[in-house]
Each structure stands twice: as C-alpha cells, then as structure tokens.
Amino acid sequence: MRSSIREDILETLYKEKVTGNSAVPIGSLAILLDRDAPELGEILREMERDGDLRLSPEMTITLTPRGEETGGKTMRKHRILECFFSEMLGMAPETAGKEACTLEHSVSDEAIERLGNYIRAPGGAGPRGMRRAKRWQVMTLIEGAEGDTLVISCVRCRGPGSRLHDLGLFPGTPVEVVRKIPGNGIVIRVKESDIALSPEIAASIIVERPG
C-alpha cells in the first residue's frame, strides 16, 4: 500500500507535468508540499528504487509511466471528492479541498467511479441500476488532447468560477480542445467561441469523454 506522502508527491508532480513542467527541482517540490528538502530526498530515492520517478544528477524529478498513472489517479480522486463536497454538499472550497486531501488516499477506485457517476447524474439510478462507466474515463480538461471533444462534469475553481459560468462553462457543456500551449494554457471551443484558459484553471475543470 502506498503512503499518503508518496501519493502527495506523485499527485504534485503530475499536476506540474500537465501544466507544462515535466522536470521539477527537489527544492520546488519541497515548497509545493511544505516539507524540508532533506526529508523529501530519502523518500524520493526510495520511490526511484520502486520505479515511480527518476532523479537526475542535478536533483530534478521526472515521473515514470507508473508514477504518472498513480499521480493522475490521485489527482482525479481529489478533484471528484472536492467537487462533491463543494458543489453537492455546499462546503466552503477551502474545507472541501482539505477533506479531499484526507480522503483521496483511502477511497477506492470503485467508490470514485460511482461518485463521479452520481455527480454527473444526481438523483438518478441507485447503485443497482447505475451504468458502469469506463474506469478513469473522467479526467481534467488540461489532460485533453488537441481535437478531443469532451463534456464538462464539474467546474471546481476557487476564484474565477463565476467568470467561467459567464463563458458558458457549465456541467454538461460539450467543449472541443482547439490547441494546447505547453506551460501557457489551453484553447477550447464552446458554442463556436474560442476561449483561452490558464493551465491552473483547466486542471480544475473535470471532464469526461462522451459515449
């Protein structure tokens, strides 16, 4: 079983990668996680031995495919939990984020899959009648590829949420990924209008592939 700190590391590195920063200095990671660099060093060396990441001689960190998969799953768990607590239960965004950070390490893949289905169709069929979606079909907008057509499941932005609503970015809205600019954001098409989003905002919008 992975420890919570290992999953926090992989999740943070994954977030950095999808926003255009694939090689993260250990000092920057320590700041992002609010931990001491020497403390992280030993953990990172263990994770390198386990095949989750690679450490360069300059002490920059890159994810392996195995680490990227775990980091992506952990981030999706966090986003779905945070969306549920905030949008469905009405919790303050800061509280929802803290609760998501705690639960993302123990909640099962099946529970997240069912919770994602419920968020997309609240009040629908219960567990016995719920249609099973493809595992990890849900992702964040920043992970979409150019040309993808996706459907917004949840908008979970702390600051500019009202602006996104003004732009028509509601749950259920189909969007097309027009182009991605590494490190500088993503351009999407919504109802024949092109909209540029920062990597941070795009990573806070949960989407799914239709069908």
Image (spheres, rainbow, N blue to C red):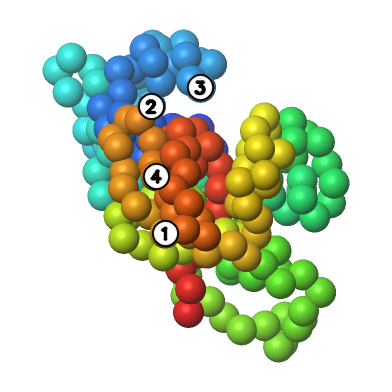
- Which structural element holds mark 2? helix
Query: Alpha-carbon distance for marks 1 and 3?
Result: 33 Å
Query: Alpha-carbon distance for marks 4 and 2?
Result: 37 Å
Q: Which numbered disc covers residue 43?
A: 2
Q: Nearer the viewer, residue 83 or 69?
A: 83
Which of the two marks, 4 or 3, is nearer to us in this view? 4
Res. 96 image quadrant: top right
Query: Alpha-carbon distance for marks 4 and 3?
Result: 29 Å
Which of the two marks, 2 or 1, is nearer to us in this view? 1
Which of the two marks, 3 or 2, is nearer to us in this view? 3
Dots 1, 4 in contact, CB < 8 A: no
Disc 3 crowd rating (10 Å Cα; few below 14, some 14-19, many 20+) is some
Q: Which amino acid type is shown beneath numbered disc 1?
A: Glu
Residue identified by numbered label 3: 33
Q: Which amino acid type is shown beneath numbered disc 4?
A: Val
Q: Which numbered disc covers residue 146?
A: none
Query: Which residue lies at the image location 81% right of the left edge and 74% below the top edge?
Result: 123
Residue identified by numbered label 4: 187
From the viewer's perspective, is 168 left or right of 139?
Answer: right
Query: Which residue lies at the image location 23% right of the left edge and 17% below the top edge?
Result: 59
